[in-house]
Amino acid sequence: MLRRRSSSDPKSIAPPNVSQRSTAMDIDSSRRNKSPRPLSDAERARLEEFIDSIHYSARYSDESYEYRHVQLPKTMLKCIPAEYHDKSKGTLKLLWEEEWRAIGITQSLGWEHYEVHEPEPHILLFK
């Protein structure tokens, strides 16, 4: 079943248009840390209180990919280390799998963080 943004579902995040799609090979690596940056025990402990408040969308797809978005509590962004943030955009960087798992996002293997919904920087887009 395809899930698209509709007027009756304004909070849904539609997959990008075909011309805007990213693949693992064309993701702008400058939007990521050069390598995964592990969290310290203290950083991990600060984020634990938010884990139960992370919201996972249903999966939706197009002809090429399956997508989902993950909504972090807005206050959680302030507790995520500065090295995970893109100061020029005011959003998180694109996170390596080790990084998004470290901040408490749990989902099956194979998901790639490919975009941040800039109007709402606490929403991370995965495919």
Image: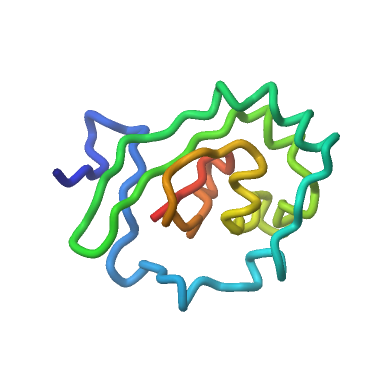
Residue nearest the observer in this picture, 123 or 113:
113
The quarter of the picture where the N terminus appears is top left
Counting from the top left corner in percent of width and height, residue 90 is at 68, 50
Residue nearest the observer in this picture, 11 or 60:
60
Quarter residue 24 falls in:
bottom left
Counting from the top left corner in percent of width and height, residue 103 is at 66, 40
- Which residue of the protein is positioned furthest toward the left in this rendering? 1
At 22% from the left and 38% from the top, the residue drawn is 6
58 left or right of 90 in image: left
Quarter residue 37 falls in:
bottom right
Counting from the top left corner in percent of width and height, residue 80 is at 74, 40
70 left or right of 77 in image: left
Exactly how many numbered labels are in the figure?
A: 0
In this rendering, is residue 104 above or below 81? above
At 61% from the left and 56% from the top, the residue drawn is 95
The quarter of the picture where the C terminus appears is bottom left
In this rendering, is residue 62 above or below 43? below
Counting from the top left corner in percent of width and height, residue 20 is at 37, 68
59 left or right of 111 in image: left
In this rendering, is residue 122 above or below 117? above
